[in-house]
Image (cartoon, helix red, strand yellow):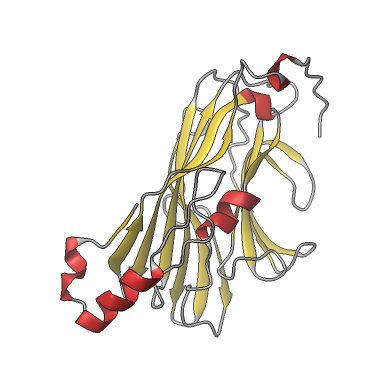
Amino acid sequence: MLRVPDASRSLTRHRLTMLSLVLVAIATQSGWSTDVAVPTEVDRIEEDWSLLLGEPDVENDSPQILNVISPFGTTEGEHAIFELNHCTQPEYLSGGLQLQRWTGPDTCVATTRTIDRGTLAIPAEEITYTMRMTLRDGTLYYSVRNGTSQTWGTFGDYGQYRLSVPTTATTLSGYRPDFSATESKVSFGSHRVKTFKIKQIRYYSLGKLVATDSTERVVHQYDATSAEATIPVVEETP
């Protein structure tokens, strides 16, 4: 559900009307909206993510998870990828965390990764973090904030995972929440993840929260009783 917070009551009647028109969710068979529109004036977006593990496999670096976020709702141009339990740029490394900036589906131009390359090994571990995009003074920033886990402890503080690029963009209204949900995935060992989802999305303008999208978008949910789950799984190192 989308709501406009009390702090936004100072907005003009015209702006509130515009918000009410654009913040519309359309139900789909997947259980979350298809392309919720965002406020027309927005310079910061935050996605709260939750990852609940089942039984990790240390030997195979399983599971492996990635997030995708874009200011324009496409991987054909500017976007970022956040990898958990593996790093792929410029070469594959097991464990750890890595934030990457891409300018197309085949061009990674910048990375930042954790010094701690711990590998997921704790059953039923829950990991939470926030994916953030910010426009400020002609610069687009990607960052990961407020991360909590048993494997890596807290992460994302003090600019630990932040990449930036100069931009002429003046708004993040091209962002699409369901692009993030569709492109993000458990890329390896999906049977070792119970749930992977967006819990909440927040929109800011000039430092003020202007809208909150509380639609829960479940990217992955493993059902151990399903017919697919009864098929033996053979894991290979990616």
Classify residue 58 as left or right of residue 162: right
Residue 93: give x, y in percent of width and height. 74, 39
| Image quadrant where residue 236 sits | top right
Residue 71: give x, y in percent of width and height. 55, 69
Q: Is residue 154 visible?
A: no
Residue drawn where x is 55% and y is 20% of the image: 122
Residue drawn where x is 59% and y is 70% of the image: 72
Does 53 appear above or below 49?
above
Residue drawn where x is 42% and y is 54% of the image: 158
| Image quadrant where residue 62 sits | top right
Q: Could you say which is closer to the camera, residue 166 or residue 186?
A: 186
Does 139 appear above or below 227?
below
How many numbered dots are placed on residues in this image? 0
Residue 212: give x, y in percent of width and height. 33, 57
Does 236 appear above or below 25?
above
Classify residue 150 as left or right of residue 9: right
The quadrant the C terminus occupies is top right
Q: Could you say which is closer to the camera, residue 136 or residue 9?
A: 9
Residue 155: give x, y in percent of width and height. 46, 43
